[in-house]
Image: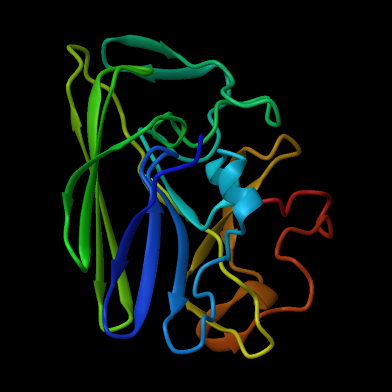
């Protein structure tokens, strides 16, 4: 069975979404040239049913990896089991592994919603806006469970890399990871990772083993 897509467009770009695949963005392209503004998702990527092969997906109710089998919340321990076959830790929450609903849809805007009971009760909403070639994503959650807990929201975009790609991402600190790829300590941003001014991407990946295997953030 094929995946149902939702389409948005403005004067300059077009965007396709797959609500049932974790509210994933599938393709965002320039109308005039077809250039991909996020990683292009071919037919086989969409057919795989995995948001990890698409352009972007929301992270809720936590992002990144959680170690030690869960975390302490005000009312006691919240146990979390691994939720993929490729990682020993529970990763990126549960929202990306559930089907979302289309609550609103117009030419340039869509609101996707999810009511989840995993690993506790919450409701999520993702608003997607297109405006003159700019994409805006707004993610919010409402806690519905009787026990208070912590949240960590995020987005997981994949960007295409072109020869003339430039990056601007000012930061003072970076989280470095241990051998298990769990963020473990903060450090000053290394020079080759510094994008406080617009710059070209390094030839090598930012994930390198050059500092005692610790630069895996």
Determine which quarter of the picture holds residue 42.
Answer: bottom right
Depth check: give the residue in front, 110 or 170: 110
> What residue sits 51% from the left and 58% below the top?
55
Colour treatment of the image? rainbow
Q: Is residue 29 above or below residue 1?
A: below
> What residue sits 20% from the left and 62% below the top?
109
Residue 159 visible in rendering:
yes
Determine which quarter of the picture holds residue 203.
Answer: bottom right
Residue 185 visible in rendering:
no
Residue lying furthest top in this view? 76
Depth check: give the residue in front, 90 or 2: 2
Q: How far across and how far down the image is residue 24, in percent? A: 43, 48
> What residue sits 56% from the left and 48% below the top?
46
123 relative to 192 in the view: left or right:
left
47 relative to 86 in the view: left or right:
left
Depth check: give the residue in front, 98 or 158: 98
Q: Is residue 111 above or below residue 38?
A: above
Q: How many marks?
A: 0
Q: How far across and how far down the image is residue 64, in percent? A: 52, 40
Q: Is residue 158 above or below residue 62?
A: below
Q: How far across and how far down the image is residue 181, in percent? A: 68, 40
Q: How far across and how far down the image is residue 176, in percent? A: 63, 51
Depth check: give the residue in front, 37 or 69: 37
101 relative to 203 in the view: left or right:
left
137 relative to 174 in the view: left or right:
left
């Amino acid at each position: 069975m094929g995946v149902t897509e939702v389409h948005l467009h403005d004067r300059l770009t077009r965007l396709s979404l797959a609500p049932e695949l974790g509210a994933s963005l599938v393709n965002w392209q320039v109308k005039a040239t077809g250039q991909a503004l996020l990683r292009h998702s071919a037919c086989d990527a969409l057919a795989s049913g995995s948001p990890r092969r698409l352009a972007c997906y929301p992270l809720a109710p936590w992002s990144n990896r959680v170690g030690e089998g869960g975390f302490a919340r005000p009312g006691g321990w919240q146990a979390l089991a691994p939720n993929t076959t490729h990682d020993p830790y529970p990763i990126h929450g549960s929202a990306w592994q559930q089907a979302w609903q289309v609550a609103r849809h117009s030419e340039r805007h869509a609101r996707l919603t999810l009511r989840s009971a995993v690993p506790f009760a919450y409701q999520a909403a993702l608003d997607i806006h297109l405006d003159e070639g700019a994409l805006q994503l707004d993610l919010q959650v409402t806690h519905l469970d009787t026990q208070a807990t912590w949240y960590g929201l995020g987005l997981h975009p994949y960007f295409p890399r072109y020869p003339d790609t430039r990056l601007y991402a000012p930061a003072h600190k970076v989280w470095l990871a241990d051998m298990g790829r769990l963020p473990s300590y903060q450090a000053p941003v290394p020079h080759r990772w510094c994008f406080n001014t617009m710059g070209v991407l390094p030839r090598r990946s930012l994930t390198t083993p050059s500092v005692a295997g610790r630069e895996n953030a």
